Amino acid sequence: MTGAKVLQVLLMMGCPEIPIQTSIALYLSHKLTNLGFDVTVAGTEAATRLLKVSDSDGYYAKKLVNLDKTMEDIIEKKSDFDICFAFMHNDAGMTYAATMSALSQAKLYSIVFGRHADELAETIEFESEKIVSKDVHNPLRLKNRLDKVVEGIAA
């Protein structure tokens, strides 16, 4: 990628109530970083604590930041991203993604997961590519869907 702009990617994580969020966030951060993207993982306090314990050496999630501070920086035009993956399994996650859609120029991907993923995905009213999986514990189906999306982005 000589001379090419390194794309800035944001992974936004809300409440870590659904188990697959942590593993998918670590997986996606690592995969995108290895492809040459500059990845920032932003989460709630609970979500970032889980990532710090799971990846204590920062091997998979190299830039781990507070989600509210990141949103504040975007609102104040101090930063922005080219691509955003918004994790959501409830209305709070949807609110973060909708806010990002309204404030940022980032290409938005909504990662909708959990038992009510289909119903939640149907309520998305902002511009976003939806990646939907009803999984709660087993991350493989969501991982495989994300692999296809990332292949398209990296192409």
Image (cartoon, helix red, strand yellow):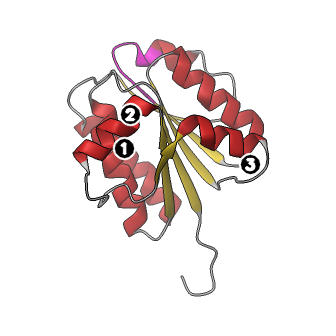
Residue 47 tag number: 2
**Mark 2 or 3, nearer chain start:** 2
In the rendering, at what x and y percent does residue 65 appear? 50, 47
Residue 25 tag number: 1
For the residues labelled 2 and 3, the Cα–Cα distance comes to 25 Å
Q: Is residue 70 left or right of residue 17?
A: right
Residue drawn at (35%, 59%) of the image: 31
Q: In this view, does 98 lie to the left or right of 1?
A: right
The amino acid marked with disc number 2 is: Ala
Query: From which residue to which does the magenta span run?
Result: 112-118
Circles 2 and 1: CB atoms closer than 8 Å: yes
Verify whether residue 117 appears in magenta. yes
The amino acid marked with disc number 3 is: Gln
Q: Residue furthest right?
A: 76
Residue denoted by label 3: 105
- Label 2 CA crowd tier, 10 Å (few <14, some 14–19, many 20+): many
For the residues labelled 2 and 1, the Cα–Cα distance comes to 10 Å
- Label 1 CA crowd tier, 10 Å (few <14, some 14–19, many 20+): many
* Secondary element at tag 3: loop
